[in-house]
Amino acid sequence: MSKKVSSSHSVPFWRDVRVLRVIGQVVFLVIIAAGIWWLLNNLRVNLRSCGLRISFNFLGNTAGFPISEGLRYDPTDVNGYAFWVGVVNTIRISLIGIALATIIGAIVGIARLSNNWLVKKLAGLYVEVVRNIPLLVQLFFWYFAVMLTALPMVKNSIGLPGSIYLTRRGVYLPWITPAESFGRWAWYIIGGLVVAIAVYVFRRIQLKRAERPGFPIIWAGTILILTLGAGWFLTSGNPLALTIPVLKRFNFEGGLWLSTSFTALLIGLSVYTGAFIAEIVRAGILAVSKGQTEAARAVGLKKLHVLRLVVLPQALRVIIPPLASQYLNLTKNSSLAILIGYYDLMNVGTTIFNQTGRAVEMILLIMASYLTMSLLTSLLMNYYNRRMKLVER
Amino acid sequence: MDENQLAGYADKNQLPPPSERIPVIRWLKQNLFSSWFNAILTVVSTALIMTIVFGLLRWAMGARWEVIPANLKLLLVGTYPVEHLWRVWATVYLIAFLLGFSSGAHGGLMRRVSTVVALVSVVLAILPFPWGTRGWLFGTAIAAAVGFGLGYLGKGIRWCKRLEIVSWVLSFPISLIFLNGVGGILPVIKGRTTWGFMLNLIGAVVGIGLSFPVGVLLALGRRSKLPAIRLVCTAYIEIIRGVPLISLLFMASIMLQLLLPASVRPDLLIRAMMTITAFSAAYMAENVRGGLQAIPQGQYEAAYAVGLNRALTTILIILPQALRIVIPAIVGQFIALFMDTTLFGFIAILELLNITRSIMGNLEWRGTIFELYMFIGVVFWILCYSMSYVSRRIEKTLGVGER
């Protein structure tokens, strides 16, 4: 009783920790706010002296500059749409780069743990070389030295098996394009997916109830493939057409064209990030102690089940968080595209700035775009981490 | 008791396991041809290595290597005036001397590093550089040796140790003043267009050095129990980490002057340094936070139990331990920052990579693109790899992850 009285009455408020905390935070916030206000005020004064005002209206004006790849775009389109084309290009290079880097990283990471001495050393050499050379130097190497200098002109292009052509104007690949009957076939895709998912869920519940390991994905996959195959035969005419690049008088026609800057950026980013992913994969595999595998084998699990039920869940828990930050790094590093002429959001953004002189607005837009991407990734990551967290007893 | 000592004691008394001598054939069989799959892998990777090595060799034979020596000065120190080059050498001597001094006083890893520096400069001095350069290079080794001698003599003396720390801290501003010049005494040499590769080095050192205190404060702020402070620090860290460095540099080049009063117009290089510091601080904060998280709760409780308050606990108990843990991470960050300085070229700062572009633009050196990129790659690789090697050694001697 007496204690309670003393704590609420005898301590003067200027020595009460609770009050001091609030005061400290208020002072801190006031200082920060004053700093920001000072900066913004400077901005206002400076902009007024140039006769400018912050406004995003310029996004509705005609862009007037060309963008050579990505979504369908015309110089008469507006700035806002041009920027969107850049955003889509960034997402495109990032997703493809992430896929490639993951493949490279997984292969090299496993190779570093191989019991073959030569393979192990080779993988180690790759990782050490790539990680210790600046990404920009590598990108310049791929773009200026390989794509624009080492590769031949279109008429002496290097042909790889499978109708792939490497030229100084870019890479040409065979590609699948939807034909006119694709619309009808699409119904089979949707139907097949719905059935496959239903079967997957049903099988999973069944297995869980029986407390048996299994691969419901195999069932679902088989059903999907069967539906798609049936649909292919039932639809009149092939729903997908294969186009192959053919050398015409001046250039290749047909197939898929990857521009030089896109190819250089893709190779550079995935080779660079692949080295980092390889180290993550290696650490993840090493993190699962050998006893786990042996114990799982001893309980009588098959090799595949050991991998899926024992090793992978534990390794992935170690691998996924740093992997996600590498994916994010790759996305952010794709902004170096501007230095080798790929039209990503940074490049389009600075071009719009050069055309309109809108510095503040463009920087806000560029940063907001990158922040959105990283925020989305980290939200996904947090969700995943919560699901995969070790259940402690 | 000192755990390190105990561990070392145990190590010394332990006999190494008997070495097993494996015949070559058996080694080959075990490591390269243990199964048919392994045999295929071996053959494929041998073919790959052969292709790369022979390709490189054939190219290296026909390459125009003369582009490197002809432009070496331009690459390393940019267009720094020749009559002032002694200022660059003086900075090199200062660093070599300090390295030698520390190695004399401490030994261990420091000694190895300074030995390598001295050896490299001697080896370089033997190469056919102009005589003046060779003299300067020999001087570097001598500076390191003199430093070593003095450090050895001063070993264990208290004020020597203090002097060492103070001179390391002061060496950086002194070098900068020396390179840049001060009004009236030494002519000012503008950094942005004339310093070459030194800009990359200085950019990284400034970035790490200045971002260190900021980063520590941010890390403490992010772990603070006061929501306002935590929120502001977290927001700063996450925003900076969420955007690419190049967008920040873009901002520095076109928007920073808009945020400052009209009377303040910092040079582009200063703005770039400010940017890289602000950028690096966010990453530094996350590294330091990692170290703070590794400190067990018991340390806090013990410190409170002996009567230390929060601030003193942090300064005297927690930070010294946490910072020791994060040294390797900071070295890693330094390497990353060093490589990131190549982005300075984006805002028209003539650093190493940007200079090569101007060399390639020169008609005389057309088509030397492979040689130049190879040179840059090798320079960066050697520096970064040796730094990461040193960092791994530090990690080992600190015993991170073993306690």
Image (cartoon, helix red, strand yellow):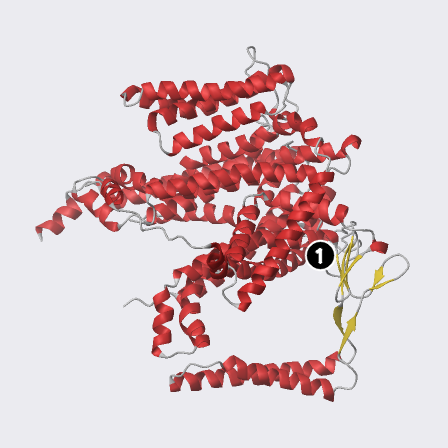
**Quarter of the view holding residue A355:** top right
> What chain does badge 1 belong to?
A
**x%, y% of residue A20?**
28, 42
**x%, y% of residue A206?**
43, 87
- In this view, the residue farthest toward the right is A249
In the picture of the structure, the residue carrying the numbered disc 1 is: A81
Q: Residue at x 8, y 50 (%)?
A: A2
Q: Nearer the viewer, residue B173 or A254?
A: A254
- In this view, the residue farthest toward the top is B184
Q: Nearer the viewer, residue A142 or B184?
A: A142
Whether residue B390 sits left or right of residue B45 in the image: it is left
Q: Residue at x 42, y 46 (%)?
A: B286
**Quarter of the view holding residue A393:** bottom left
**x%, y% of residue B58?**
71, 44
Query: Which amino acid type corresponds to the residue marked 1 in the rendered image?
Result: Tyr
- In this view, the residue farthest toward the left is A2
Can residue A55 be spotted in the picture?
Answer: no
Q: Measured along the vertical axis of the image, is residue B327 above or below residue B188?
A: below
Number of callouts: 1
Secondary structure state at the residue bearing disc 1: helix
Label 1 crowd bin: few (<14), some (14–19), many (20+), radius 10 Å: some
Which image quadrant: the N terminus of chain B? top left
Q: Measured along the vertical axis of the image, is residue B134 above or below residue A266?
A: above
Q: Nearer the viewer, residue A220 or A24?
A: A220
Q: Nearer the viewer, residue B248 or A175?
A: A175
Can residue B250 be spotted in the picture?
Answer: yes
**x%, y% of residue A92?**
65, 60
